[in-house]
Image: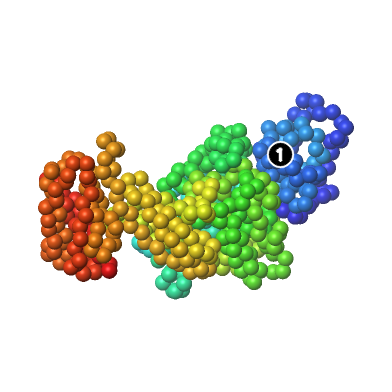
């Protein structure tokens, strides 16, 4: 937020030498400031950036430009701030700078089959109708999800766009979400536009068709509907930052540094809805849209230390900003390092959604500040779409790059939920996990060569060395893990293990320890079902390993069948000479 409105407002100064205002005086001041809404927007100067660390959990800092801070506060937060005797200036609230008439221009209700021009802010009901309309107009590739409900029982909705929309597929899941700060509305409309763009270009534009076929794209245009429609359901005029409890949702999440409740408040209904939604999905990458600045803000917000994937963040951030520069006017999206910044280097935030998603959900989520003006005039909404939509698409594509694949069980071929950890690289929970449902994992990462360890309880850990990744390319890496079939009750191996596998025909069998006959049988069966080897094995006491040498086996896949007398075990055997 770079525009100042000096002069049109009362400039309230509290001299540093002056004692703290009397309680009575404070209450009068507060009643006046908070008579229309539960929050105030204001600015003040700091002498040193360290002061931010003290203030960031007391008030909701919105922007820091040099030594000038812009912030919001509820009545309680503002009273705490006044206790510090810092001179401040109240600013017009961003939700009321334009008139209601200007904000409501071009409003158009949803009509099936009509072409929509996204140059307006819908009423709340129109918004719901559009979201439902997307899903009913494109039932094969779009469905409506309810993330949850706000405090005032408005709907928090998302649409999912993908081929085979009712099946969980082995593909990256991507999330766009906007306006968790209710008065930052540019992203709200740009996300409605994006939904419409993806759906209406499916089957027409080959790149969009390919993207929808291979990605599950989830879009939530309005994360804080009570904030955006604070002024009433017919207009976004009067939109506010906070939720209906006058709490900043984007300071209310668990924080990796500070802990469960960094703002001192219980998790809000909206916060809990998002936490559950993240748990029920498996987002690989996400964008959280804000306004009031123009910059790509990447993790961490809470920590000074850099993220494990700092190089990747700078690379994808640069791609985002450079693309915007090619398509936008001079001076747009050039804040801080020409449009990108490390979050903490700008100003520390605790309890933000970005760090929560990165740390607890292994999701690469960025805070994307899309317009200096929070409540953008309607006649600029199409221009901002044109500056930005290519960057939206590029970022979705980045969820396919790096390396990805499936993790499955060597015996059953069933998918496994496994940890995918990059040795000497991953830290602070930057690793990813494959999904139990499909075995699919996606690991966006900067170009390089990596040693990757796959692990899952009940399986032998496997490290794949020298996984090479280039920019803008996908390295496929499907991995099978061998079950340990370890019986937790009696601490014994209860399955047969083949080692090494693949082998040249000379291998060992590690036999189950119980229950077992002194005599067991082994058969090796080819893929046509013919038995190519069979023998009786006598297991000597204390020795659970049997050595087998079959030089006559040719290269290929075989099944090893082991009959213990009580149970039959099947495993795969690969011969590779
Ligand atoms: Zn914001």
Q: How far from the left and from the top, in percent, is residue 248?
A: 61, 41
Label 1 C-beta lies within 8 Å of the nearest ligand 1 atom: no
Q: How far from the left and from the top, in percent, is residue 486?
A: 28, 43
In the rendered view, does 492 fall on the left or right side of 47?
left
**144 or 438, nearer to the observer:** 438
Residue 490 location, quadrant: top left
Position above or below: 4 against 154: below
**Residue at horizontal 61%, vertical 49%?**
300
Position above or below: 466 against 28: below
Q: Which residue is mark 1?
A: 55
Q: Helix, strand, or loop for circle 1?
A: helix
**265 or 36, nearer to the observer:** 265
**Residue at horizontal 80%, vertical 41%?**
88
**Residue at horizontal 54%, vertical 59%?**
191
The C terminus: image quadrant: bottom left
Position above or below: 558 against 358: below
Give the colour scheme of this rendering: rainbow
Residue 129 seen from this side: no
Residue 22 location, quadrant: top right
């Amino acid at each position: 937020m770079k525009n100042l409105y000096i002069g049109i407002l009362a400039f309230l100064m509290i001299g540093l030498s002056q004692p703290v205002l009397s309680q009575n005086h404070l209450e009068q001041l507060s009643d006046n400031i908070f008579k229309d809404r539960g929050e105030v927007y204001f600015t003040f100067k700091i002498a040193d950036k360290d002061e931010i660390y003290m203030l960031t959990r007391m008030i909701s800092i919105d922007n820091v430009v040099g030594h000038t801070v812009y912030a919001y506060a509820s009545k309680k937060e503002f009273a705490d701030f006044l206790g510090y005797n810092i001179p401040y200036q109240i600013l017009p609230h961003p939700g009321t700078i334009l008139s209601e008439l200007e904000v409501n221009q071009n409003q158009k209700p949803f009509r099936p089959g009509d072409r929509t021009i996204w140059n307006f802010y819908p009423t709340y009901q129109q918004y719901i109708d559009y979201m439902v309309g997307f899903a009913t107009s494109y039932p094969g590739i779009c469905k409506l999800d309810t993330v949850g409900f706000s405090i005032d029982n408005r709907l928090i909705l998302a649409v999912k766009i993908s081929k085979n929309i009712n099946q969980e597929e082995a593909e990256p899941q991507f999330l766009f979400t906007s306006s968790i700060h209710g008065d930052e509305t540019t992203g709200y409309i740009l996300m409605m536009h994006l939904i419409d763009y993806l759906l209406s270009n499916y089957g027409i534009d080959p790149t969009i068709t390919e993207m929808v076929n291979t990605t599950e794209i989830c879009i939530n245009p309005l994360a804080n509907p009570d904030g955006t429609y604070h002024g009433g359901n017919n207009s976004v005029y009067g939109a506010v930052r906070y939720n209906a409890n006058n709490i900043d949702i984007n300071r209310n999440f668990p924080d990796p540094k500070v802990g469960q409740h960094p703002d001192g408040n219980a998790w809000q209904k909206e916060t809990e809805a998002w936490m559950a939604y993240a748990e029920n999905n498996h987002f690989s990458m996400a964008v959280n849209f804000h306004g009031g600045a123009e910059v790509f803000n990447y993790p961490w917000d809470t920590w000074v230390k850099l993220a494990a994937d700092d190089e990747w963040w700078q690379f994808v951030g640069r791609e985002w900003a450079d693309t915007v520069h090619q398509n936008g006017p001079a001076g747009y999206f050039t804040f801080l390092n020409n449009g990108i910044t490390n979050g903490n280097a700008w100003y520390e935030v605790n309890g933000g959604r970005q760090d929560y998603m990165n740390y607890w959900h292994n999701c690469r989520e960025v805070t994307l500040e899309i317009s200096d003006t929070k409540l953008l005039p309607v006649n600029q909404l199409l221009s901002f779409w044109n500056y930005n939509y290519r960057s939206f698409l590029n970022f979705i594509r980045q969820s396919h790059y790096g390396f990805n694949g499936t993790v499955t069980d060597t015996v059953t071929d069933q998918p496994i939920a496994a940890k995918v950890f990059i040795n000497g690289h991953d830290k602070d929970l930057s690793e990813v996990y494959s999904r139990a449902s499909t075995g699919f994992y996606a690991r966006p990462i900067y170009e390089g060569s990596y040693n990757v360890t796959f692990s899952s309880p009940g399986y032998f850990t496997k490290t794949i060395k020298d996984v090479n990744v280039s920019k803008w390319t996908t390295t496929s890496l499907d991995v099978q893990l061998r079950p340990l079939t370890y019986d937790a009750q009696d601490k014994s191996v209860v399955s047969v293990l083949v080692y090494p596998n693949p082998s040249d025909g000379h291998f060992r069998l590690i036999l189950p320890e119980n229950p077992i006959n002194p005599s067991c049988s082994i058969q090796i069966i080819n893929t046509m079902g013919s038995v190519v080897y069979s023998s009786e094995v006598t297991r000597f006491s204390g020795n659970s390993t049997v050595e087998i040498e079959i030089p006559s086996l040719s290269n290929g896949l075989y099944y090893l069948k082991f009959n213990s007398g009580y149970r039959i075990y099947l495993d795969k055997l690969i011969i590779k000479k």
